[in-house]
Image (cartoon, rainbow, N blue to C red):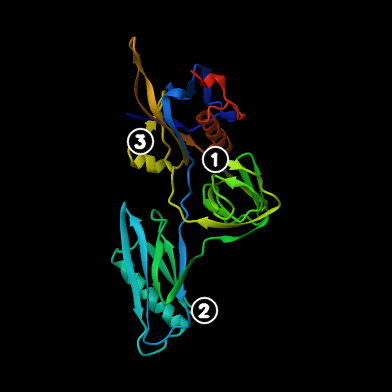
Amino acid sequence: MRKYIILNTVAATAGDLTTPGQGVVKVTGDLQGFKRGDVDEIAVLPFVNETLEIVRVTAAAAPAANTTYQFTIEQTVLGKKKQALVSYFTGATTPSASAFGIAITAVLQGLINSNQLEVSAVAHATGNGGVDITALTGYAVFYVKQLSGVVAASTLATATSSGNLSASGTTITMAQNPTAAFTVGSLVKLSGWTGTAVINGRTAAQGVTLRVATIVANTNVTFTASTVTGSITAAVTTYALIASQSRGLGQSFIDLGFIAGGSPSVSVVAANAYHEVVVKGGSFAGKSMAQEDLAPLDTRYLISSTASAANALLLLARFVEVKNYFGPGVTTVDPLLLD
């Protein structure tokens, strides 16, 4: 049976998690806790901000007469994949860039009006003409595919950072000025750093997608990785903001019917952003002479980042240490986590 433990006020220095010994892990509000050796999975899922995709579709060359321009938009709505074909035939008259943009936008708007897509569309009049397509709240991600006569490019922030990338443990810092394009909780793909560093198993050539952890205005952006091996030398890196669905909003948990949890019971706050830690495995159910019986365990800790983002991140880091059997602030095995 799944249970939820809600932490709206998070203690400093990861004080909500304690290890009294014999492998036991206690968390504020969870009277039972769990034994590290009895759980199979500890998954740390930080909240993710919704970032709406914005794609500009333009004619690949100056619009021509008697030519068909088309592309397909694909998105998932309420768990079902939707596809809609946007197709525009210019006719005998060569359209201007402005006329082309207005016409192809009108075709797309017709699909929107008939509830085939959850996006908005604005004509793009310059260059070769085209349309700017923006996702709607709740349906943040869409894809433009099967292009004919047109090109498409996301207009979310992408560039080369203005400073160096560095790593301290699993904290990745990107010097960046300005930082206006970033928000805590957004997803960013980093690539092209200099050095031997492998981040979350990904090389500089492959790139890695990380969540923004903190921002120092017009100075730097930090990310938290799971693993970092090797080093980053005087690096310049490229970055690209990634369209993403939101994860961890209090209202989302309420909509799913999870409104409170823990002892004493604490309510989910609709406006809060929650990190989620999933602990699955077994919990003590009794003993026979032959074996220790374990009942299924599925505990979800909802850790609010709203009151203190820093405290919440420290508690997440402590869960990661417990996952690895490490003591607080070290990378060596903690005897208190062993049976």
Q: Nearer the viewer, residue 185 or 269?
A: 185
Secondary element type, mark 1: loop
- Identity, as a three-letter code, of the amino acid under mark 3: Phe
At 52% from the left and 17% from the top, the residue drawn is: 20
Give residue 195's position: percent from left, percent from top: 66, 50
Q: Which mark is residue 226?
A: 1
Residue marked by disc 2: 127
First in residue order: circle 2 vs circle 1: 2
Q: Which mark is residue 108?
A: none
For mark 1, does the 10 Å Cα neighbourhood hold few (<14), some (14 to 19), or many (20 or more) residues? some
Q: CA distance from mark 3 to mark 2?
A: 50 Å
For mark 3, does the 10 Å Cα neighbourhood hold few (<14), some (14 to 19), or many (20 or more) residues? some
First in residue order: circle 3 vs circle 1: 1
Secondary element type, mark 2: loop
Give residue 205's position: percent from left, percent from top: 57, 55
Residue 302 falls left or right of residue 198: left
Q: Nearer the viewer, residue 3 or 268?
A: 3
Quadrant hosting residue 72 = bottom left
Image quarter (top left, top right, bottom left or bottom right) of the N terminus: top left
Q: CA distance from mark 3 to mark 1?
A: 28 Å
Q: Nearer the viewer, mark 2 or mark 1?
A: 1
Q: Is residue 317 above or below residue 179?
A: above
Q: Nearer the viewer, mark 3 or mark 2?
A: 2
Give residue 186's position: percent from left, percent from top: 52, 50
For mark 2, does the 10 Å Cα neighbourhood hold few (<14), some (14 to 19), or many (20 or more) residues? some
Q: What is the residue that sits farthest to the left in this orientation? A: 114
Q: Which mark is residue 258?
A: 3
- Identity, as a three-letter code, of the amino acid under mark 1: Ser
Give residue 70's position: percent from left, percent from top: 37, 74
Q: Is residue 111 visible?
A: yes
- Identity, as a three-letter code, of the amino acid under mark 2: Gly
Quadrant hosting residue 289 = top left
